[in-house]
Image: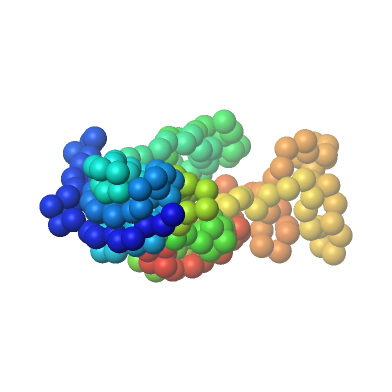
């Protein structure tokens, strides 16, 4: 027994594009096609579904290539005549980009006031324990990709932007979150990836440049000082060894002026062009 002929029915071709959120971001195609199948009497439903000329499960639609065959439904119309409905499902080929701006707040220690002067007591002793709320802008970008390269994304997690990105100068943006989700039948082509990326922008503060926005800033201080040619433990006015770090000059000698404190900036992230992410 075998199928004799398969003919596509123009009258059964149709479909619908729908979205639960009324957004292109979660839009889905449901496309149907119909076929007339002439078989031999006694051919079973599995023979009809596997007939040459009929799309099979997982096959891509010939024009809307992001949709795939989700079901094949043969219905007998006579002893040797069948009607087969083929249903395709999947997202549209072209999707939009969803962009959401928000912010995040962290509490950071401070040692300088708004004018940049050291915060000290009347006796020039550094005041410890003061903090300031720092609000960073965060952009959340959601879009779909046909393919993703997680190895390339990993490099961005360890780097800031070397280019101007969304109006922010180099060094101020950092990818702080990336997720990608895909649903597909085992053994069938992947559907589009739903990607969500979070990028945090840091405005430089406390005598920091844009390029140093994500550098680690630390005050040059310690328990040891350079005294002539000897490195020794710093002592107080009574000659007692100090238990708290003291300010140091660039040479390592004792610095007694809090306003002359030296701050170092240590780079811990690399630098790559964020336009390469292809998010927007």
Give coordinates of residue 19: x percent, y percent: 22, 40
Q: How many marks?
A: 0
In the image as oriented, which residue stretches furthest toward the left?
11
> Which residue lies at the image location 30% right of the left edge and 61% below the top edge?
5
Q: Is residue 272 left or right of residue 126?
A: left
Q: Quadrant of residue 55?
A: bottom left
Look at the image and tell me in which quarter the N terminus lies: bottom left
276 is higher (above) or lower (below) than 77: below
> Which residue lies at the image location 30% right of the left edge and 48% below the top edge?
80
Look at the image and tell me in which quarter the C terminus lies: bottom left
Q: Is residue 68 left or right of residue 266?
A: left
Closer to us: 15 or 195: 15
Closer to us: 234 or 19: 19
Q: Is residue 37 left or right of residue 123?
A: left
Closer to us: 266 or 105: 105
> Which residue lies at the image location 29% right of the left edge and 60% below the top edge?
6
Give coordinates of residue 216: x percent, y percent: 58, 52
Whether residue 4 can be seen here: yes
Give coordinates of residue 194: x percent, y percent: 39, 48
In the image as oriented, which residue stretches furthest toward the top?
129
Colouring chosen for the image of the structure:
rainbow
> Which residue lies at the image location 44% right of the left edge and 60% below the top edge?
147
Whether residue 170 can be seen here: no
Give coordinates of residue 232: x percent, y percent: 85, 52
């Amino acid at each position: 027994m075998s199928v004799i002929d398969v003919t596509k029915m123009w009258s059964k071709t149709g479909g619908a594009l729908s979205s639960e959120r009324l957004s292109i971001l979660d839009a889905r195609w449901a496309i149907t096609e119909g076929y007339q199948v002439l078989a031999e009497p006694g051919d079973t439903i599995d023979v009809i579904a596997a007939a040459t000329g009929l799309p099979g499960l997982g096959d891509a639609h010939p024009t809307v290539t992001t949709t795939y065959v989700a079901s094949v439904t043969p219905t007998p119309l006579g002893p040797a005549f069948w009607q087969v409905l083929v249903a395709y499902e999947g997202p549209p080929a072209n999707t939009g980009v969803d962009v959401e701006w928000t912010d995040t707040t962290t509490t950071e220690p401070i040692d300088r006031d708004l004018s940049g002067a050291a915060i000290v007591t009347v006796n020039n002793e550094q005041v410890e324990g003061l903090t300031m709320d720092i609000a960073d802008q965060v952009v959340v970008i959601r879009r779909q990709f046909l393919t993703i390269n997680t190895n390339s994304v990993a490099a961005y997690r360890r780097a800031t932007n070397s280019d101007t990105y969304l109006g922010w100068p180099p060094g101020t943006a950092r990818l702080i979150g990336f997720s990608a989700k895909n649903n597909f039948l085992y053994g069938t082509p992947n559907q589009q990836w739903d990607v969500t990326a979070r990028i945090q922008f840091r405005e430089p503060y406390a005598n920091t440049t844009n390029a140093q926005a994500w550098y680690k800033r630390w005050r040059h201080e310690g328990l040891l000082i350079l005294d002539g040619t000897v490195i020794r433990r710093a002592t107080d006015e009574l000659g007692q060894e100090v238990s708290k770090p003291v300010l140091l000059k660039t040479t390592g000698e004792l610095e007694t002026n809090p306003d002359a404190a030296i701050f170092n900036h240590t780079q811990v992230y690399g630098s790559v062009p964020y336009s390469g992410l292809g998010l927007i």
